[in-house]
Amino acid sequence: MLFGKYLNKYYKKYWYMFIIGVLSLIAVDYVQLFEPIFLGQIVDHLSQNESADVSFIGSLCIRLLGVALVMFLGRMLWRFTLFGASRKTEAGMRREMFQKCERLSQNYFHSTKVGSIMSWFTTDLETIEEYTGFGTVQIVDATFLGILVVIRMLSLDWLMTIFALIPMILIVVLGALVEKFMAIKWEQRQKNYDRLYDFAQENFTGIAVIKAFVKETKEVLAFSKVAKKNKDANIDYVRVSIVFDTLIEITIALILSMILGLGSWFVWACINASPVHIFGHAVNLTPGNLITFIGYFDTLVWPMIALGSLFSMRARARASLKRVSDFLDAPEDVKDAQGVSELTDVQGEIEFRNLTFAYPSAPDRKVLSDVSAVIRPGELIGVIGRVGSGKTTLITLLSRLYNVDEGTIFIDGKDIMKCSIKSVRNAVAFVPQDNFLFSDTVANNIGFASSDYSRDDIIKGARFADVDDNIKGFSSGYDTVSGERGITLSGGQKQRISLARAFLKNSPVLVLDDSVSAVDVDTEETILKNIRCERNGKTTIIIASRISSVSHADRILVLCEGKVEAFDTPDRLLEISPTYKKMVYLQELEKEVKGGN
């Protein structure tokens, strides 16, 4: 069996299925050993009597049918229980891995490619499922059936049994030696498969860019190199597996030839009443005994093959379980500390107090330095700054997507690091720069935050984002499927649907990260007006690259190289903030150029 802390729990959970399956498998193994006995009795009866006793042979045939029926029912039972338990184990581990994905921080996904994770969810879990199901069958057959057959063979003739078993034992020894080598080859195969998966996933995601730059041929050639490495790794693994299987088949064929040759000689000598003596042992082998012995050996072939292939399968399963276990053991950077409190009745006051932050992947590069600001409940706040000034990072930290030092970010006077992540994120509705839409209907995308929203609620959210008229113009209205990542929608439509989704959440704090950059000026004015009207008394933060998006804000926070340059009203910023003054000047200049002056 294969053991590990993430696998043992499923043995305990589905113990009854494993026990029923193993017991039914043992019953089948025991019953099937009567088949060679009955066949041998028929052969001896026909060879020793001039006229066959029809009733005797008929009774033996009925017994053979009974054996076949028991084997049929038993195999049905163990297949249902053992394979059912292994599939349930796979499903449980996949669910556990998915929940782990939801708990892991963004930093983990920055350093781990999606293709690798998908490989763990597919081929590695399938390998574990194969071993817990079919591997259990092989273990039981290799031990219980193998021992029973050897005992029966020894009862017929111990010398013949020794001749047959010595080469079979070599198979087991060879399998043990091959196991570690097979594990290395399997891990190399999986790593190359991960690279293939990563490359394909990245190309499918960026297919529009590839086509736009006419790089199809270049990417096909690059893919062929990755695919060749994957093919070579698979061939290396299969080559070792085939060589091992071939050696097993050749060994079995040689043993069977030896049994037929020696057995025929022993039977001939026995018939002529001059049995062969070897090491003082007289070999008395009748034709029926030879048929029974060959039947036993034929039954023994499967446990020996199972034992040999079990080494290879176990090597693969161990490598896959290690990869899955490493993933499940990955540290969860962003998680609730012990004794956290809940954010309740949030009014929307936000304070940044001497906040300094660097991403875990680049700890020496400070993205934010000594940021301090207080946002009062119900304020409409704008955040502006040059590219790379830390605007998005500041708001990302507010949603607890990364850890910050205690005592640096507060909501309603409560340190967010001492509050539960769920309550913090429930208090903040976030519209990111990368507007992600699921491959679902427009209505379900807008109502993503809760299943309790009515169609009227969804329409209200769409009207808030000024996208209702666009949606009504779609082929199926609100039931139109947006396609993967909203591929069938324009950039402005995706932004507004994302905005409608966030508005419908009705959180005390709404954050828009450059979320109206893809809409025209009139639409932007409508959305900003709706924000003023519909979110009166609730805190709203707008990150923008256009001054027009924040010109009507109560106050504007200006960031420059990760530091607060100024935080005041728009009119006051014209006097105290060089960055804001320059952005206003450039925007006015742009208007003049477009106007032809």
Image (cartoon, rainbow, N blue to C red):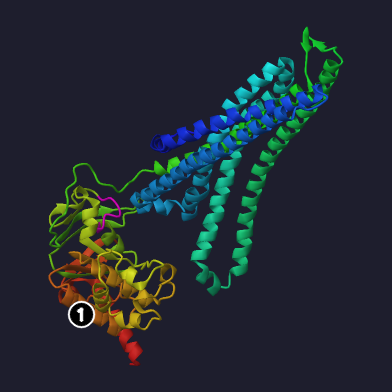
Percent position of residue 378, x then y: 13, 68
Tell me if residue 380 comes above or below residue 86 in the rendering: below
Residue 269 in picture, x, y percent from top left: 85, 16
Rendered location of residue 589, percent (x, y) = 31, 84
* Residue assigned mark 1: 529
Q: Nearer the viewer, residue 77 or 352?
A: 77
- What kind of residue is marked 1? Lys
Packing grade of label 1 (10 A; few <14, some 14-19, many >=20) is some
**Residue at point 36% right, 49% down?**
99
- Give me the residue at 62% from left, 55% from top: 227
> Which range is magenta?
398-404
Q: Which x, y percent locates residue 380?
A: 17, 71
Nearest to the observer: residue 186 or residue 350: 186
Q: From the image, give the main secondary structure of the stretch colored magenta.
A: loop
Q: Secondary structure at mark 1?
A: helix
Residue 364 falls within the magenta-colored stretch: no
The answer to which of 172 and 186 lies nearer the viewer is 172
